[in-house]
Amino acid sequence: MTSFGFAFSASVALMMLPACPSSSGDDTPGPSSWVPSDIDEQATLEQIGSAGYARLCNAFDDYVHDTYRSQLLVKAACTAHALETTTDAAMCGEELDTCLDTLPPVVQQQLDQILAQASCTQVGIAPNGCSSKVSALKGCLDALGDLVDQVELSATCAAFGSPVPNDWWVIDEPAACAALRTGC
């Protein structure tokens, strides 16, 4: 299975919690769908061309940033930052509060790395010559979004000094993305 993700050098203790269900897997048309209304989901990626593909990717990127930039994810990134930059649990708690009030650039970068795992860039296909349908791309991206949803972590300063899994941020390629590639 192919792994998606970016290196994250945090030496923090993070405990994964199951995420709340998201609407990203919802394939029903309507306001909850991120696919632009003028793009036919039954069209092939080749038929919509590079411009249509770029519109789809931009729409999904906006959707991901709006949907998955949850308070849980922000709190986890701030806690990771606090664990890295302090020497005891009390200082960690203070740094966490400061981070939540004003997000430091390093934390914003870590959030961007987590969210970047659900993107057209990670899928790595070109629309030219691709006979896979827009709906297959939507399924792949929605599956990636669901996996990012699972990366919403909870960390506490009480876990100070606990070991960190090196691959906590990596999401595996969903089957929907592998299936998408067969037509491209």
Image (tube, rainbow, N blue to C red):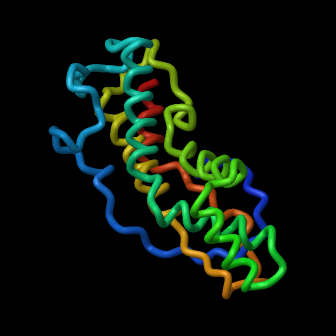
User: Could you tell me which residue is drawn at 44 percent across and 13 percent down?
Assistant: 50
Residue 170 at x, y percent in the picture:
62, 56
Front residue (pair 156, 3) = 156
Visible residue check, residue 2: no
111 relative position to 39: left or right:
right
Residue 81 at x, y percent in the picture:
71, 64
Determine whether 162 is above or below 80 in the image. Answer: below
Q: Quadrant of residue 101?
A: bottom right
Front residue (pair 74, 126) = 74
Determine whether 103 is above or below 141 in the image. Answer: below
Please give the count of numbered marks on the rendered protein.
0
Q: Quadrant of residue 52?
A: top left
User: Could you tell me which residue is drawn at 34 percent across and 42 percent down?
Assistant: 139
Question: Which residue, as the protein is rendered here, is positioned at the far right?
Answer: 87
User: Could you tell me which residue is drawn at 30 percent across and 37 percent down?
Assistant: 34
Front residue (pair 39, 156) = 156
Determine whether 80 is above or below 127 in the image. Answer: below
Visible residue check, residue 114: yes
Residue 123 at x, y percent in the picture:
52, 35
Determine whether 88 is above or below 58 in the image. Answer: below
116 relative position to 109: left or right:
left
Residue 165 at x, y percent in the picture:
71, 71
User: Could you tell me which residue is drawn at 38 percent across and 26 percent down?
Assistant: 56
